[in-house]
Image (tube, rainbow, N blue to C red):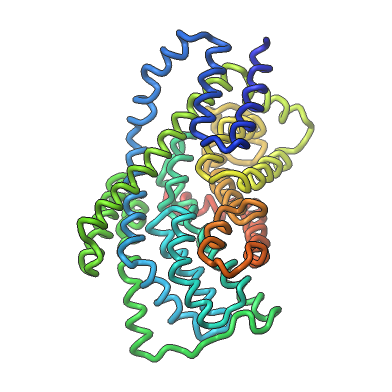
Amino acid sequence: MEPITLGLIGLAVLIGLIALRMPIAYSMIIVGAVGTVSISGYKILFSQLKTLGYGQFSIYDLTVVPMFVLMGALATKTGLSRDLFRAANAWFGWMRGGTAMAAIAACAGFGAVCGSSLATASTMGKVALPELERYNYSPALATGSVAAGGVLGILIPPSVILVIYAVLVEANIVTMFMAALIPGLLAVALFIATIAIYVRLVPGSGPAHGASDKAEFWAATRGVIPVLVVFGIVIGGIYAGLYNPTPAAAIGVFAVFVYGLIRKQMNFETMAASIKETAGTTGMIYLILLGAELLKIFMSRAGVPQAAADIAVNSGLSPMMIMMILLLALVLLGCLMDSMSMILLVLPFFWPVLVAMNGGDYQMAEGSGYGMSTLDLKVWFGILALVVVELGLITPPVGMNVFVISAMAKNVPMLTTFKGVMPFFASELVRVALLIAFPALTLGLPALLGN
């Protein structure tokens, strides 16, 4: 059987295993291993396995992953989310829809120390949903705003998925963090604007409550200081070139740990639970990475990525049309699987296509198809990919964030929550259009800071 045929059969089997709800890491490992044996034999597979794990996990840049995961786990357990929401509610609560806006702002702040969408949605849901219910917000706006706010955890740096993406395409992690900042802030602004429009179109859906008195306002505002300190130490230090992401993450863990001690929220049980959670999450990420590498080896030997690139180049479609097709595929896949698995699964197929459409190979200095170098294309597509992955997290029928919030708001039908996220889905489409039309929104800050 021809290798390309084996590759296509392997893809079909992989999709079938995922549909049968086999964990994606095991699905990729099985397909990658069996496919490699089918093409090259057992000896080649065992020869690769001998060094593949060590070579994959000894990459220095990947050591940042457990540190950022631990920082998020500690932040979840130290009351940081409550302080953020309290401060944001003091700022926005006096406006119509203000408490929903506060949920968005608090999700953005928590995402700056967490880096996980599902963790942001679940943590902020516990804090924000009771308050939104207390102020008689409509169920659709209440659940929809928290589910949508959760997606901010993926993009606002530091982000674990950005680190993984950078490692896979050999991009600079610092550059990716710089490129993510403006698109992340743009999402916050568009979400808040969406709420402001929604409460005017649907009167009574987001009533205002009285403004906080001066003492309460400043007391609540002081609760934001720890987040600003952590963000400034971690991201500010990286942007300023004081240290690279790995020591920055370690410093961030220490800063959140000290905050927990000051708040008397940190004890042996909390620390042990955070470390256990970090070990489980990191192990899952690394296993998916191993599976993705095995699958990539098989597909490369079968020639599937190269064939996909040839089809795209010879299709007669413009480079931008190919980009739109790939982004649409990411949105659809995002409805069916988690963001980390999806990025790892599709990147070996999508990236060669984009490089080919840009007019050259990985080593070229300047591209023609997208009017930018391959290095800039890595950054631009990485941010676009994460934005549309965010879309998948709130897209029917299997928006992961919607399921998380629905499990917490048991009195709200899931259909109502999906209706509530649709305005935010529309605002995300606006953001995608802006980022495609104006690449400088992504590439401007790295260029300005000389990275």
Horizontally, is 395 left or right of 288 in the view? right
Going 37% across and 19% down the picture, which residue do you hit? 51
The N terminus: image quadrant: top right
| Spot occupied by residue 242 in the image (x, y as percentages of width and height) | 28, 50
**For the view shown, which residue lies furthest in the right direction?**
316
| Spot occupied by residue 303 in the image (x, y as percentages of width and height) | 62, 19
Q: Nearer the viewer, residue 137 or 192?
A: 137
**For the view shown, which residue lies furthest in the front direction?**
411
Horizontally, is 15 left or right of 213 in the view? right
| Spot occupied by residue 181 in the image (x, y as percentages of width and height) | 47, 57
Image: 253 above or below 307? below
| Spot occupied by residue 363 in the image (x, y as percentages of width and height) | 52, 27
Please indicate, yes or no, whether residue 186 appears anywhere in the rendered image. no
Going 36% across and 78% down the picture, which residue do you hit? 221
Going 48% across and 50% down the picture, which residue do you hit? 447
Image: 399 above or below 361? below
Going 53% across and 78% down the picture, which residue do you hit? 133
Image: 375 above or below 74? above
